[in-house]
Image (cartoon, grey):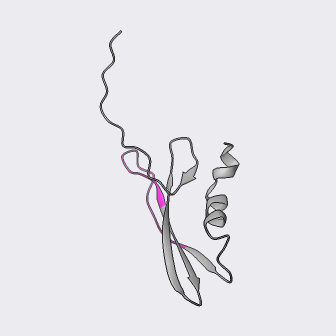
C-alpha cells in the first residue's frame, strides 16, 4: 500500500467518512523521542456528542489505529 494512502489526513478522513457535520481537531500527541511511540488523539465533535480515536505512527511512516509491535530483544546465529 502506498504511503499516501496511509497518511494522517487520509486515515482521519477514512475513519470519519460516514459522520455528517463533524468538526475535527487533534487534541493530543506524543513527542518523537526514540523510545516513545508517536501518536495523535483525534477528537470529533458533532450534534450527537463527542468521540475520539487514536492513530499511531508505524515504523514505515504510515499511520494506523493499531499501535506498532514493541521491539523485543532478538538474538541471531550466523
For residue 14, which quarter of the picture? bottom right
Instruction: Give above or below for 73 relative to 78.
Output: below
The residue under the point 61% across, 58% down is 8
Q: Residue 76, position in %: x, y?
A: 33, 18
- Classify the position of the C terminus by image quarter: top left
Left or right: 33, with 19 as reference point: left
User: Of residues 50 and 18, which is closer to you in this image?
Assistant: 18
User: Of residues 4 and 29, which is closer to you in this image?
Assistant: 4
- What range of the chain is rendered magenta? 26-39
The residue under the point 47% across, 58% down is 39
The residue under the point 59% across, 90% down is 47
Secondary structure mostly seen in the magenta stretch: loop
User: Of residues 51 and 27, which is closer to you in this image?
Assistant: 51
The residue under the point 61% across, 66% down is 15
Q: Residue furthest front?
A: 18
For residue 77, which quarter of the picture? top left
Magenta run includes residue 31: yes
Magenta run includes residue 21: no
Q: Residue 62, position in %: x, y?
A: 58, 48
- Classify the position of the N terminus by image quarter: top right
Q: Residue 52, position in %: x, y?
A: 49, 73
Instruction: Give above or below for 45 relative to 10.
Output: below
Count the numbered circles shown: 0
Left or right: 13, with 59 as reference point: right
Q: Residue 22, position in %: x, y?
A: 64, 81
Q: Residue furthest bottom?
A: 47
Amino acid at each position: 500500500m502506498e504511503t499516501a494512502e496511509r497518511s494522517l489526513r487520509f486515515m482521519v478522513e477514512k475513519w470519519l467518512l460516514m459522520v455528517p457535520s463533524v468538526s475535527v481537531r487533534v487534541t493530543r500527541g506524543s513527542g518523537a523521542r526514540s523510545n516513545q511511540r508517536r501518536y495523535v488523539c483525534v477528537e470529533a465533535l458533532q450534534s450527537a456528542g463527542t468521540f475520539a480515536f487514536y492513530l499511531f505512527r508505524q515504523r514505515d511512516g504510515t499511520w494506523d489505529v493499531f499501535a506498532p509491535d514493541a521491539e523485543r530483544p532478538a538474538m541471531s546465529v550466523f
